Amino acid sequence: QVQLVESGGGLVQAGGSLRLSCAVSGRISSTDTMGWYRQAPGKQRELVATITRGGSTNYVDSVKGRFTISRDNAKNTVYLQMTSLKPEDTAVYYCNADVAYGLGNTHKDYWGQGTQVTVSS
């Protein structure tokens, strides 16, 4: 059973910082691309940032320069450091991982349960 366990959400004032973590557990071989997505009330889920196993990153324009995605391959964990937070960053943040498992190196996409980030003005 593969699980993605997120932590680090909460309530912060505008201009503040938060760090999200997402750890992948279970009988896996490795994690490939990992990322963070978010969904605000009444809006569609959107990509925030992704990072490949080799460390290449991609960000949505609205968070460039404020958010930093990183990962620890040995721990199968991805992080999202969020700084200069704005009220419009308020959303449920979801972790996503492309997980490889089994003798045939099967790949499957997994999601975390989501963690609430609320930024007050």
Image: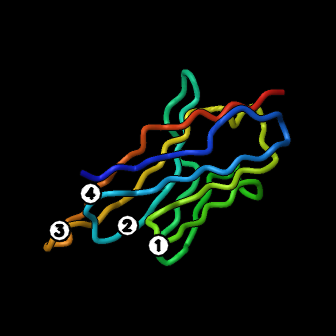
Q: Is residue 66 above or below residue 51?
A: above
Q: Residues within 10 Å of mark 4 (few under 14, many from 20)?
A: few
User: Measured from the top left, where is residue 63 in percent x and y?
Assistant: 70, 50
Residue type (three-letter) at the residue carrying disc 1: Asn
Of pointers 2 and 1, the one earlier in the residue sequence = 2
Residue depicted at 29% across the width and 53% down the height = 2
Q: CA distance from mark 1 to mark 4?
A: 17 Å
Residue type (three-letter) at the residue carrying disc 2: Thr
Give the position of the C terminus as an image quadrant.
top right
User: Measured from the top left, where is residue 78 in percent x and y?
Assistant: 52, 60
Q: Are marks 3 and 4 in contact (CB under 8 Å)?
A: no
Q: Are marks 2 and 1 in contact (CB under 8 Å)?
A: yes
Q: Which mark is residue 102?
A: 3
Residue depicted at 25% across the width and 62% down the height = 27
**Residue that numbered label 1 is attached to:** 73
Q: Are marks 1 and 4 in contact (CB under 8 Å)?
A: no
Of pointers 3 and 2, the one earlier in the residue sequence = 2
Q: CA distance from mark 3 to mark 2?
A: 12 Å
Residue type (three-letter) at the residue carrying disc 4: Lys
- Left or right, 98 with respect to 20, comes to left
**Residue that numbered label 2 is attached to:** 31
